[in-house]
Image (spheres, grey):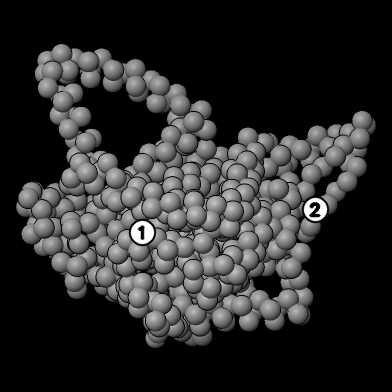
Amino acid sequence: MSYGALDRTRETSGIFTRDRRTMWLLGLFIAVGCAVSVGITVVAGSYDYGVLIAAGGLLLAVPGVALVIKAAPEGIAAARALARNWTWWHPLWFFIYFSTLVFRIRGVDAAAQNPLDGYAMLRVLPEAFVSMALITRLILKKPNWLGSLFRGIPGAMAIYCLVCLATTGWSVNAGWTAYKSLEFLADVSLLAAVVASAEGFFTYENLVDWTLTFYGISLVGVWLNLPIWPTEAMDGGRLTGVMPVEASNSVGTSGAVLSIISLCRLLPVFGKAKNRAWYTLLLMFGLASMILSKTRNAEAAFIFAVFVIIVFSPRLKKVSLWGGLALAPVVALAVMMNDRLTGYAGNFVLEVVNRDQSSGAVDTLSGRTGWWAFGLEQLAKHPFTGLGAYAAGRFAVLGKLGVGAAAMMHSDWIEILIGTSFWGIIPFAAALLGAWWYLFRCIRSEIFTPEQRQLALELFALLGMLTLHSFFNDELAWHCPLLYFAILGYAEFIRTYPKIQLKPGLQLRRLRFTESSVSEVPLNLVRKTVN
């Protein structure tokens, strides 16, 4: 009788489990259906061919819902894995992300008169909490991260921060320069603390995934704004974040990041693909966000990432070569039959590049060249000192030009140059070049495991995007480039990766692996050493 009761309990539990799963799937189906309906309604009234786009959306809705249902368990499993490996730096990294959110736009005069308004405290308080936590952990030596702060790639960034802080003495706005420099130094200190407490490759893999989660959250927030503020969210026909405020360029960057990482993990050069449904969904989500934001830098960066994947993948190189040879006769025949096709293709490319702007706006890079030229004129008056880090661009250039709503010069390199002269450029560029070199070294070296090389390839592609953006936006030197910092952290891991030095008799000369890094030693290298 007891066995029968136990069987009935199991059967009842199974029924409840199936019912609960059915309700989850039903709720997910309803939510996706509502989102699709709202999206189609907004698109149908926002574009000239909105009805056709809406019809295409309806055709794709059913396979899209099927993909969401299949991808949801994979996404939930990834989230659970991230939660199981939660450690002390995860909340601090989140606080840094939260402090970057913008809830209002104000001009130069308002920023100068009342730098610490209510919304500014949403940025200051999380940063203050992170700083206090880092100081406490330094005192308790959990970990003692001060050595990591002034060594290697984080050390170059710390020197850059000290240079910025030194410009306070002659800054056009000393208080602004001092706070921004200390704020960025706190960000770099958190990176150094993560590096000092890292337990091997797994820590950096976890750090990258946690950072990518923020990009996904920000894009979900942007899309949730769309049905609430449809006009503001499609400002000028470009997808934009309303609350919190997120510029179209930032939306395009987030979409490009998710698209690049998803493409790399769907077509891995090293190892095998995992969670195909989840990364397919992320790829579609990222591409849709990038395309609707009409961000040319992001689109160019995505093309660069595809090129990187092809270059490092022998299989994809062959597919590209033979595919190109197969398509060449078809394209040539089509052009011979209709010589206007090349003109149509050229006009399409020009329309994408121009983005409905006038020729003057395109020639001046949306007004950037005028800002940069005036900034260099101001720098010429102080060529050896600059005008103060983080304050020169906003108060000495944009304020005088009457562009009060702009907070930055839309170029990391111009911003650093006019703020710190060449003194800040040197350590900042050293950190960037070091990251490029060590990631490339990891990709090409067989000392590293396939998982380590694959992550290096993914970050190599993302670093290409960030480097391209740094010439036209503030991506690397403005609070806080979390993705760039995660890349720098992994590059530092590669720089200090334990090396095996062999004697002539193929015996181990030195073994510096920790317990967590033993599993990261390539098996073929271990076999060669033992034999």
What residue would you read off at disc 2? 513
| 10 Å crowding of disc 2: few (<14), some (14-19), many (20+) | some
| 10 Å crowding of disc 1: few (<14), some (14-19), many (20+) | many
Which of the 4 image quadrants contains residue 233? bottom left
- Amino acid found under the numbered disc labelled 1: Ser
At 18% from the left edge and 23% from the top edge, which residue is drawn? 342
Q: Kindly state the secondary structure of the residue where label 2 is placed.
A: loop
- Establish if 10 lies above or below 399: below
Task: Work out how far the residue at label 1 is from the one at label 2, CA to CA, in angstroms.
Answer: 40 Å
Q: Residue furthest front?
A: 381
Residue 369 picture location, percent across and down: 35, 47
Between 402 and 124, the residue placed more toward the observer is 402
Front: mark 1 or 2: 1
Residue 301 picture location, percent across and down: 40, 43
What residue would you read off at disc 1? 250
Q: Kindly state the secondary structure of the residue where label 1 is placed.
A: helix
At 12% from the left edge and 50% from the top edge, which residue is drawn? 53
Answer left or right for 101 relative to 245.
right
- Amino acid found under the numbered disc labelled 2: Phe
**Quick check: can you spot residue 482?**
no
Q: Please give the label number shown on residue 494.
A: none
